[in-house]
Amino acid sequence: MKKLMHKIFSDLNQAVELENLRHLKEGTLAIPKSEVLLFGQMSLMLNETAATILNLIQTGDMDAKLQMDYFTKKKLLGLLKSNGLVYDEDSHLVRLPDNAQVLELFKFKNIEVKLIDAESTLVSKAVHAPQKNKQLIRQALASGKFPALADRIVENNGRLDLFLEDNNE
Amino acid sequence: MNEKEVIEKIKKLAQQDIQRRADPRYLKVIGFLVAKGFLYTNKKIPLNPNEHLKLKDVIWAGRYVEPRILEVLPAAYERFKKHFAGDADAIEKLEQIIDRIKQKDDRNMDFYGIPIEKVKPWFFIRLRDGRSKSLTDRKVSKTFRFKPETITILKNLKDQTGLSETAILEELITNETSV
């Protein structure tokens, strides 16, 4: 997934670069630098520490906060589509817990790609989508590699007892 | 139960989750869905693009191991029907949600607790095999009756351009509508 995302953002950077050259020739303003902040399952997948500890499965969904102009966003959506991925337009609804840290992932001339730290992503999942992430949160808690996870779930009004529910076969 | 006891119980359930992730039913399902491009994983697993799956195994894997399986199952079933077998009840549930999506009916509906809007995007993605078409890319057959001279012109255009008759007609229509 990291290789694929690097390729997508590298191609996007190149497309912006070419468009900026055109703008320069025409004497118009260059496209401002873009910023992408990834969260959700994709940010876990791209976080090397989390990906070593956890068994991750994801759909082609990309949750992210995008700071970019129309041209760049349109290009990005096209690149995602041609690689079987989809940008989740409801990404603005994702709520991040307090003290979430932002980590750098890729830095190109025209785009910076960052992600939310793994523990904060897990807190967000545990609080806002516990059913869908039950097994993932149990694995993260059991691993002992996210020492503040349980406390942060409770601090953010999540319920640990929800992870005791198991649909008995 | 205090927090420490809850965590202890969660750890026991996490052990059960490990066993379930090693279950052949789960491995078969995930191996198929990852191979086709519906799901991605960070661990190496055997990929089985030609696997034939029992719907009850897929639903078991979605309910007890990985809920994202249920999110992509209707789209996977719609694109690769021949790879799935199951009882009438499971097939009916799938057909209902597929019809709703094909008819662009936005009324609330869920598939084993997964809302329709979470299921829908996977009907339109480009898959790894590059062969199976998404709902928007799929061609629909339609019959027309042309005059013999129109057929001759179409055949001549086909010989001159090397394009198929369908491609020639589609290009003419696209050019006409884009003016």
Image (cartoon, coloured by chain):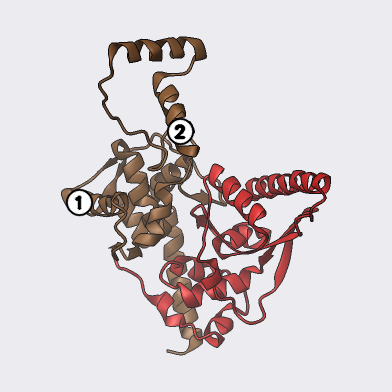
Task: Determine if residue B66 is in view.
Answer: no
Residue visible at 42% across and 31% down in the picture: B173
Marked residue chain, label 2: B
Q: Secondary structure at mark 1?
A: helix
Chain B colour as displayed: brown
- Residue contact between numbered discs 2 and 1, judged by CB atoms under 8 Å: no
**Horizontal arrangement in the rendering, residue B32 relative to residue B90 (left or right):** right
**Horizontal arrangement in the rendering, residue B176 relative to residue A141 (left or right):** left
Q: Which numbered disc, 2 or 1, marks the residue closer to the eye?
A: 2
Give percent across and percent down for residue B21.
Answer: 44, 55
Of the 4 image quadrants, the one containing the C terminus of chain A is bottom left
Query: Which numbered marker is on residue A77?
Result: none
Residue visible at 35% across and 63% down in the picture: B114
Task: Determine if residue A130 is in view.
Answer: yes
Give percent across and percent down for residue A38.
Answer: 63, 63
Query: Which class describes the residues within 10 Å of circle 1: few (<14), some (14-19), or many (20+)?
Result: few
Marked residue chain, label 1: B
**Horizontal arrangement in the rendering, residue B158 relative to residue A72 (left or right):** left
Chain A colour as displayed: red
Q: Are marks 2 and 1 on the same chain?
A: yes
Task: Work out whether B110 lies above or below B87.
Answer: below
Q: Which residue is mark 2?
A: B176
Q: Which residue is mark 1?
A: B92
